[in-house]
Amino acid sequence: METQEIEALLSRKKIPLTSMRMLVLKEFLQVSTAVSLADLEERLNHSDRSTIYRTLKTFEKKGIIHSVQENNTTQYLLCHDHCTEGHHHDTHMHFYCTQCKKTTCLEEVAFENLTFPKGYKIAELKFVAKGICPKCQSLQ
Amino acid sequence: METQEIEALLSRKKIPLTSMRMLVLKEFLQVSTAVSLADLEERLNHSDRSTIYRTLKTFEKKGIIHSVQENNTTQYLLCHDHCTEGHHHDTHMHFYCTQCKKTTCLEEVAFENLTFPKGYKIAELKFVAKGICPKCQSLQ
DNA sequence: GTTCTTGCAAAATATTTGCAAGACG
DNA sequence: CGTCTTGCAAATATTTTGCAAGAAC
């Protein structure tokens, strides 16, 4: 993705441009699986962890990324839907492979029109399936 | 629940009886929401954390409890289904209230016959909805 | 006596915050 | 200047393990 596109995405989400934010977002656009804070720290040449951390918090809040927790860590993924501040729409399945320890989106398995009991105000849905991914399966 | 019933449940799951295991299981039968390791430690009069920890691991493995991760902690809940070692069937929704920070089962929202893309071997499903529960909602 | 369980201590891992310096408008 | 962002250091929270003593079979 072009630098211009990254800038456009950030300003569309009303996030002031900084070079760290561009770096982090660029990274998200390049990986296909979910990444943790520690992953990013390593991938970004050991940039400062708390800066990345706060960038992730900002991104998640503003609807650029979403997260799921698995294996005792928070994994972050790009939103493919049109999420905005306070309105996440990532109602698709995620898959955590217990072998390669990677989390991915499985948008094919989507949920529409879930009905909740009365009185529940739903803000966000987090679906994770655990198992073995096709790749690891074939290596056995 | 009677002590006898607790013992019966443990032996049905092929878990050797110990007093700590009985204490932990008794606790699960008494609470209506999910509990974390720290919760249990406190509820059990500050019994040893690592003993409780290993008890939880045993219970989860043997299909007495299941867990979901939210708010950076692992929350444990009794299995209501007929789970056994290696076969968890807790394919129901969980709800995490961002206000009271409690996690509960929402078995009304169940999923049957989920279809995954080819090649994925699914072992377990973890569904969490985040939002505000009826109780907290009504207190606003 | 061999295996399983417990308790204590401590390690390992992950998340989060305070604060001062710097960047930006 | 005033606000937002960064980097460093450190605190906090949570999970996990080593090991020796004790319990159970």
Image (tube, coloured by chain):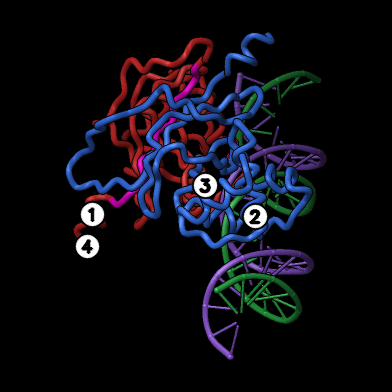
Chain colours: A red, B blue, C purple, D green
Mark sitting earlier along the chain (3/4):
3
On the picture, is A73 further left or further right than D20?
left
The answer for how far apart the CA atoms under marks 4 and 2 are is: 36 Å
Answer yes or no: is residue A26 visible: no
The answer for how far apart the CA atoms under marks 1 and 4 are is: 7 Å
Kindly check if marks 4 and 2 are in contact, taking CB atoms under 8 A apart as contact: no
Q: Secondary structure at mark 1?
A: helix
Which mark is drawn over residue B52? 2
Kindly check if marks 3 and 4 are in contact, taking CB atoms under 8 A apart as contact: no
Q: Residue at x 47, y 25 (%)?
A: B106
Provide the residue span drawn in magenta. A122-132
Secondary structure of the magenta portion, mostly? strand
Question: Where does label 4 land, which residue?
Answer: A139
Q: Amino acid at mark 1?
A: Lys
Question: Where does label 3 land, which residue?
Answer: A73
Which is more foreground, mark 4 or mark 2? 2
Which chain contains the residue that carries disc 2?
B
